[in-house]
Amino acid sequence: MAAAGSDGGSGTVTAALAAHSTSPASPRSSGLSSERTRIAVLGGGAWGTSLALHAARMGHEVLLWALEPEVKRAVNEEHENTTYLKGFKLPESLRASNDIKEVAAFGEVILMVIPTPFVERTVAQVVDALRDSSILVSCTKGILNDTLETPNEILKRVLPARLHPRLAYLSGPSFAAEVAKEIPTAVTVAADNDDVAKRVQEMLSTPRFRCYRTHDVAGVELGGALKNVLAIACGISDGLGFGSNGRAALITRGLDEITRLAVAAGASPLTLAGLSGIGDIVLTCTGDLSRNRTVGIRLGKGEKLEDITATMGGAVAEGVLTSRSAHHLALEKGIDCPVISGIYRVIHEGADPVDVVTQNMSRPLKPEVDRRVAQAAHLAEVPPAPARGDGATAVPGCVVDC
Ligand SMILES: NC(=O)c1ccc[n+]([C@@H]2O[C@H](COP(=O)([O-])OP(=O)(O)OC[C@H]3O[C@@H](n4cnc5c(N)ncnc54)[C@H](O)[C@@H]3O)[C@@H](O)[C@H]2O)c1
């Protein structure tokens, strides 16, 4: 995939980081915790392979499930995922298999990195192979078209109740290629169970990959899914030549509607002000590695969606499908989402993007801040102060933990 393998960071930054490489001379030398874990990664696309590489570099034992026999062969024989993450050497210790049950049974922790439409049938295949002690981390960003379910809702429907407290969700601004390059990255891990979130946080954090944690699963999932629709909008704006003003307006008003929609689904507005909200929006709406933004740019230049997807070589731009789900979710919740609905009309009803922009800009004038979001921000639960040794920064004289 060109997007995954293309140069996401400046050569100077990459060279500077190489000079200070954290790649472990011995296992576990780069991680912030010393525990070695058996990690199964389900999904050998760009993100699954990059996370598997990250975990293997940390010294964890990693087994990758790939759907495609050629991905398994290339990972095991050429030590490179030449289909989805071209240009990155994988350690020989990182093995791939096409046997999904074998891979799931191997993992104490299972990272699920499957595009949304395939989550249900993939997880259904491994239910019997899971242990009660397994931790399952969804790294998928999307909303199903027909049921409007997020991965959390799909997983809770498919998995037995005893495994629900073992679920976590990893999201945030993280291009696969940049994580593979060890460019400093920050993500967030959401889980109902704080011990599970902490375990995943400690298991995956390094000085180049910092994990935060939260209880707000809905906020993290909806932020991660909906920003892909906004990235298409920003791409269309760029493709039409609308410049920096247009992009800044879209990012800001898009964040507003994503926040209103997420709050209506039970999320905290503060989550959308974090890594899985504005963080991921900035990444995908401005970064050249974003497939969704690239789809938008090409749509803005007048190409047809079918022609664009035909050239993507199997890579998935989740925002195309999510635009349909997001539009219907907004209708279901009664939330006015002009950007999301505009993208739905462009992609699925063939509307002219310039007409959509003109109509959106001509709507009745209104206050900037929505009353329900302001209320929710006021009521948002303040997390308890961390105990020393639990993330608090002991800076003499500093009373605020940053
Ligand atoms: N690429 C990134 O930088 C990135 C970063 C963060 C999150 N994500 C999210 O991770 C998820 C996976 O994306 P990706 O970029 O790794 O994928 P990709 O587009 O690189 O590859 C497509 C993946 O879909 C799999 N697939 C295709 N048909 C399938 C089927 N019938 N059953 C099961 N799997 C099938 C392929 O095997 C492959 O793993 C998506 O939800 C994406 O939004 C991606």
Image: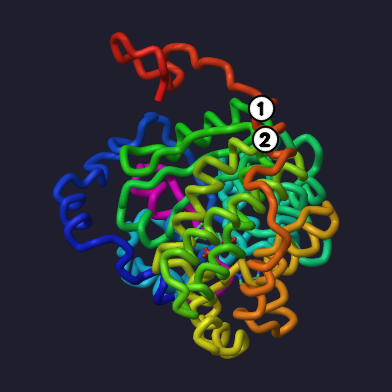
Q: Residue at x 49, y 80 (%)?
A: 240
Mark 2, ligand 1, within 8 Å: the answer is no
Q: Mark 2 and mark 1 in contact? Answer it, CB < 8 Å.
A: yes
- Point out the stretch of residues depicted in magenta: 51-70
Q: Judge the density around disc 1: few (<14), some (14-19), many (≥20) Cα neighbours within 10 Å.
A: few
Q: Residue at x 24, y 62 (%)?
A: 10
Q: Nearer the viewer, residue 390 or 254?
A: 254
Residue 94: image quadrant is bottom left
Give the residue displayed 66% in from the left and 27% down from the top: 378
In which quadrant of this rendering is ligand 1 seen?
bottom right
Q: Amino acid at mark 1?
A: His
Task: Report the residue marked by disc 1.
Answer: 378
Q: Answer above or below: position of 386 versus 12.
A: above
Foreground: 250 or 151? 250
Q: Secondary structure at mark 2?
A: helix
Q: Is residue 344 found left or right of 148 in the rendered image?
A: left
Q: Quadrant of the C terminus?
A: top left
Element type where label 1 sits in the image:
helix
Q: Is residue 57 magenta?
A: yes
Which residue in the protein does label 2 denote? 374
Q: Is residue 20 above or below residue 308?
A: above
In the image, residue 64 lies in the stretch drawn in magenta: yes
Q: Is residue 75 left or right of residue 158?
A: left
